Amino acid sequence: MANKDLVKRAFSVTLNLPTAQRSDAVDAPEANPTPSHPAGSPMAPQPVPAEQGPSPAVPKTGPGSMLAFMTEQSEVHREVVRLRDRLTEFDGAQAMRKLDPKLIRASKWANRDASHFQTEAFRRLKEEIASAGGNVQPIKVRPLDGAARPGAPQFEVVFGHRRHQACLELGIPVQAVVDPGMKDVDLFVEMERENREREDLSAWEQGVMYMRALEQGLFPSAKQLAAAIDRDLGNIGKAMALAKLPGEVVRAFGSPLNLQFRWATALKDAHQRDPEGLLAVAREIAAKVPAATPAEVFAALTQQGRAGRLGETSATEWKDDDGKRIASLTIDRKGRVTVSFDQPLDEGQRRKLTKAVDGFVGLKAQ
């Protein structure tokens, strides 16, 4: 059947040949006679025919037409093979696209705190992207599952949150590589390693990222998480210890970016030893003007120095009608409370006070 079709196409070529090429003298027009000129009259200039290049040979028979057709098909086949070979050079390559940054949302594993976008480093990155007319180094995204509503995000950042944010603020398209088959684990690993090679995350940000991965079951244990991202298990533990600190303690440092790995153990111990006292000191430090340096905050919170302390004690007093103090309640910088009486207590008063304390702490005095 294929051969029959080939023959039909070849004969169709023959049938469509111009008639001027199938006959010579029969249909040729008669030559114009040479015009006569009166004696002594000048000769009229004769037009010089334009030179014509040799016309391509056109087959005049059915077999010749078939041969020409097959030759043409052979050329097409060679071109197809050449293009196919070139295409194999791009096997595994991922095309880069320009996307509207409004159609891209941050990853659910995003590990950049919003304060990162207020730093000098981010300002320089934004200026560089604006100067280049876009991000030269593309970000990586993956499509979101399900059909997106018009105007709703259609992609999720794999890595490149800072570049995406810069393009979003500049109102320009973002260069992105789209990976449609990326899984959560692969996304997490690529994001962590890519950020490690660029602007390092703070210890606190890393801890938040690791805790989120474990809480959502991305990895069954911190040990397997460390193996997947090729990080030291001890550093992962320190980062998560910082991430577990109360918000008041983190805010005392001014920014979570100021927390350091080497402070993790001391801050964790201070929190376990006296959580309420640590919170009280942190609140005082956060309200201090001018703000203390991160090192001063660390020293105050861990009792390794007096820098950053805002006062040793606060007190509440009870006075009689004459204004004479009869009792006081003091709270030291660790939040510990001391109740004292300026007058001696008799046995009945001591029993009442003991009973009141028993009820307050929920335990019987020994």
Image (spheres, rainbow, N blue to C red):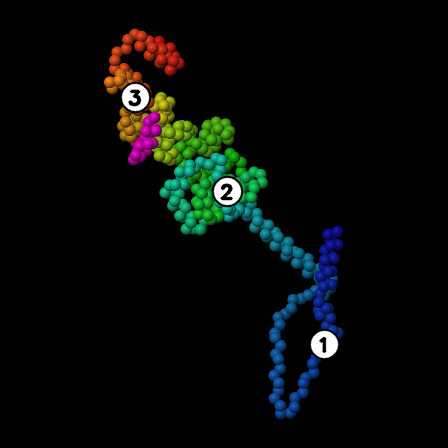
Q: Which circle, 2 or 1, is nearer the viewer?
A: 2
Q: How many marks?
A: 3
| Numbered mark located on residue 29 in the image | 1
Q: Magenta stretch: residue 272 in it?
A: no
The image quadrant of residue 15 is bottom right
Residue type highlighted by circle 2: Ile
First in sequence: mark 1 vs mark 3? 1
* Disc 3/disc 2 C-alpha distance (Å): 56 Å
Say whether residue 304 is left or right of residue 29.
left
Q: Are marks 3 and 2 in contact (CB under 8 Å)?
A: no
Q: Judge whether residue 81 can be spotted in this image.
A: yes
Q: 29 or 83: which is nearer to us?
A: 29
Q: Which circle, 1 or 3, is nearer the viewer?
A: 3
Q: Is residue 102 above or below residue 248?
A: below
Q: Is residue 179 above or below residue 275?
A: below
Q: Quadrant of the C terminus?
A: top left
Q: 64 or 280: which is nearer to us?
A: 280
Residue type highlighted by circle 3: Thr
* Disc 2/disc 1 C-alpha distance (Å): 74 Å
Mark 2 lies on residue: 104
Circle 3 sits in a helix, a strand or a loop, which is it? strand
Residue 163 in percent (x, y) is at 44, 44
Q: Magenta stretch: residue 295 in it?
A: yes
Q: 11 or 301: which is nearer to us?
A: 301
First in sequence: mark 3 vs mark 2? 2
Residue at x-position 33% and y-position 9%: 351
Residue 176 in percent (x, y) is at 50, 45
Say whether residue 248 is left or right of residue 61.
left
| Numbered mark located on residue 316 in the image | 3
The residue stretch that appears in magenta: 280-297
Circle 1 sits in a helix, a strand or a loop, which is it? loop
Q: Residues within 10 Å of mark 3 (few under 14, many from 20)?
A: few
